[in-house]
Amino acid sequence: MNRRHAIFTTLAAASLIGLSLALPAAAQTTARATKAEAEAMVAKAVAYIKANGPDKAYAEFTNSAAFKDRELYVIVYDLTGKNLAHGANAKLVGKDLIGLKDPDGKLLNKMLVDLAKDKGKGWSDEFKFRNPTTDSLQRRIVYVERLGETFVGCGVFLD
């Protein structure tokens, strides 16, 4: 019995070690953000702006981890293309980015501004953008919701 118990204990320990090594890899492949999560992040951000005011909210979106989840982060722009909050790059706050283009020449922020103005909310066409979690150029789409003379957005990477 003791030998059998020792073998079982050794096998169980080896299985747990193997499982613990496999879990991070599996988590990385399933940890990609979804469109539903991006839409929920925008809804949470809009509610936060309404409850706390834009100044506090924009600082929170830009500087806090509360509105960041993997590659999901909140952006806020006015309808002229000026960045008001950016969860992945605080250096962009306050800059007029209406002319920002992706490597294929797509006017990213103009597309988002036009979507907010014309439809009020919805998903953008895809464009190429740097993923802050992988530091690689990837295809991306952004969900935006207009709020007064601004819009709140959050995107997902497609590849």
Image (cartoon, rainbow, N blue to C red):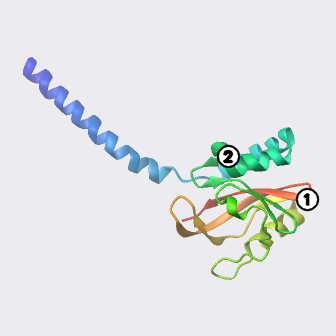
Q: Position of residue 22 (x, y in %)?
A: 34, 46
Residue 39 visible here: no
Which quadrant: the N terminus? top left
Rendering quarter of residue 113 = bottom right
Q: Which residue is mark 2?
A: 67
With 72 as the anchor, is 93 left or right in this view? right
Residue at position x 63%, y 45% from top? Answer: 65
Residue positioned most to the bottom: 105
Q: Position of residue 59 (x, y in %)?
A: 75, 49
Q: Secondary structure at mark 2?
A: helix
Residue 129 visible here: yes
Q: Which class describes the residues within 10 Å of circle 1: few (<14), some (14-19), or many (20+)? A: few
Which quadrant: the C terminus? bottom right
The disc label shown at residue 149, or none: 1
Residue at position x 67%, y 54% from top? Answer: 87
Residue at position x 64%, y 82% from top? Answer: 104
With 95 as the anchor, is 69 left or right in this view? left
